Image (cartoon, rainbow, N blue to C red):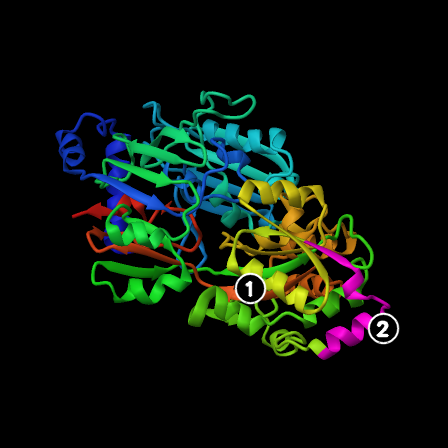
Amino acid sequence: MTTSRRSLFAGASALAAAGLLDHLPGRAARAAERVGTLKIALLGLDTADPHRHTGSIAVQQVYVEGLTSIADDGRAIPYLAESWQVEDGGRRYVFRIREGVRFHNGRVMTAEDVKANAERVRDRIGRGWLSAPMKLVTKLEAPDPRTFVMEMSEPYGPLLNLLSELWILAPESDGWAGTIRQPIGTGPFRFTRWVPNELFRGEAHDGYWQAGLPRAEAVEFVLRDMDDPSLALRAGDLHIARARFAALPELQADPNIQVQFMKDTTWYFWSFNNRRPRPPFDRVKVREAIACAMDKPGLMRLIAGDAGVVTNQMAAPGQFYWDEALHKADRHATPDLDRARALLREEGVEPARTALRIVSWQTEYAQAAAQAMRGLGFQVEHVALDDLGAQRRLNAYDWDLAPFASGPRADIFLRYIRMLSDGPNVGLWGGPQDPAFDALVRQAVAATDLDRRRALYLDAWRHAMDRYWTVVIGHAAEAIANRREVTGWSPGFTWGANRVDGGVAFAKLG
């Protein structure tokens, strides 16, 4: 964060403390300087209740904010908490709440509001993203309006990063006791209109705590699936859009378009049904045979062109939690059809007489995976669905193989949690239930030493690899393009469309 931006935050806090934010002539002038409506196509919005999301986080973060934000290098930095202290060997966290932050209804946010949100997630949101750390919470306190305290039964290393997705809402939000229908947040744009699978509109929050922001009058997210958002981007119907890798050469050659990349990666993988596997796909050697038929280099070229990289791990090459020795030992780095057929013969499996049920999104990558299995001789039954349909089918466990992808996350734990026995939205990874894996991951998150945490995570990953729960193909950083008339905007570490030091609040139409 630059010195000038730190000064900007401090100035906003000082004005709020004096109770002047809503009365200064400068605020009205800044509002008058806002220009236009930013039209955006990134990910969808699966629920109006930010505490109940299942992974679609691109839209929420324009109207709600967390105690922390994720910097471009993956670190947790201050957001609604201006500072914090970690005490008692990582078991006690004391947060200093930023002064003068106002909810969209005009009320000043206090530590008591933060406590109420933490209690709601802990007590009412089962199997959510924060379910694992919330089970370790022994005490939540708000001793004064600007101090929030969390005490844990054991150290929990990922907590500061994960709190970037503990989005703070006013407890008077409609539906607080059940499912929130009209969230009242603190973000730069208000929750104004939502048409599921079609449109989200957020209008500027005049009482926003960061002076001079947002710079647009409103944001509109297109939520429906678009075959190629770059066409609408080039036509000027969108200002910011997710860019398909196949469209990158044309976009990069267009003088009206700027292409940027997210700081974390999306990883691509094939998962097996681990919860209720059908014979013969419940056998490790049969799964290994299928993995031998994967053409990782070819699939990554199809997915991402030159932007993709082949590996066998949750973390991308070069990241802290990636292991070079494990990468070099990847037995599926290139396809080996002869070994695949030999393993099937060894297991007594006749592919021509064996149905293989594949569930996927509607992507070329999934079609290529299905075709590879047909090439191996299986009788493939491929069901390609939209996001909600795929989630329903996955969680019914009526399938054998699932070629999917998972996007950037605020912490590596948010990838491992999806394989825990009680993890959220586990269908994408076949719902494994393995106490030994669970124990390794829990030891990792409790480790205060980073090298020890990394070693435990890698042990857990080897455990999963040996059982062929899922087979990683590779990684690619998502490309997001914007029209040149949009200035001040850049993508961050995750899909979140806004953060403390960048995103759509900083974007200006010129």
The residues bearing labels 2 and 1 have C-alpha atoms spaced at a distance of 33 Å
Instruction: Please state the horizontal and vertical placement of residue 6, each as a whole percent of the image.
Output: 28, 49
The amino acid type found where label 1 is placed reads Ala
- Dot 1: element: loop
Q: Which mark is first along the chain, 1 or 2?
A: 1
Instruction: Please state the horizontal and vertical placement of residue 2, each as a whole percent of the image.
Output: 28, 56
- Asked whether residue 133 appears in the rendered view, the answer is no
Instruction: Please state the horizontal and vertical placement of residue 322, each as a whole percent of the image.
Output: 57, 68
Q: Which residue is mark 1?
A: 315
Instruction: Please state the horizontal and vertical placement of residue 475, each as a whole percent of the image.
Output: 51, 65
Q: Return the residue nearer the eye: 483 or 421.
A: 483
Q: Residue at x 44, y 30 (%)?
A: 169
Q: Is residue 375 left or right of residue 67?
A: right
Q: Is residue 92 left or right of residue 153?
A: left
- Asked whether residue 297 appears in the rendered view, the answer is yes
Q: Is residue 359 left or right of residue 478?
A: right
Decide: few, some or many residues near mark 2? Use Cα within 10 Å; few <14, some 14-19, many ≥20.
Answer: few
Q: Is residue 345 magenta?
A: yes
For the magenta stretch, what is the residue range? 338-357
Q: Residue at x 27, y 48 (%)?
A: 239
Q: Is residue 376 left or right of residue 227?
A: right
Q: Return the residue nearer the eye: 462 or 230.
A: 230
The amino acid type found where label 2 is placed reads Glu
Decide: few, some or many residues near mark 1? Use Cα within 10 Å; few <14, some 14-19, many ≥20.
Answer: many
Q: Residue at x 27, y 42 (%)?
A: 38
Q: Which mark is residue 16?
A: none
Q: Main secondary structure of the magenta part?
A: helix
Q: Which residue is mark 2?
A: 346
- Dot 2: element: helix
Considering the image in quadrants, where does the N terminus appear? bottom left
Q: Residue at x 50, y 50 (%)?
A: 161
- Rendering quarter of residue 400: bottom right
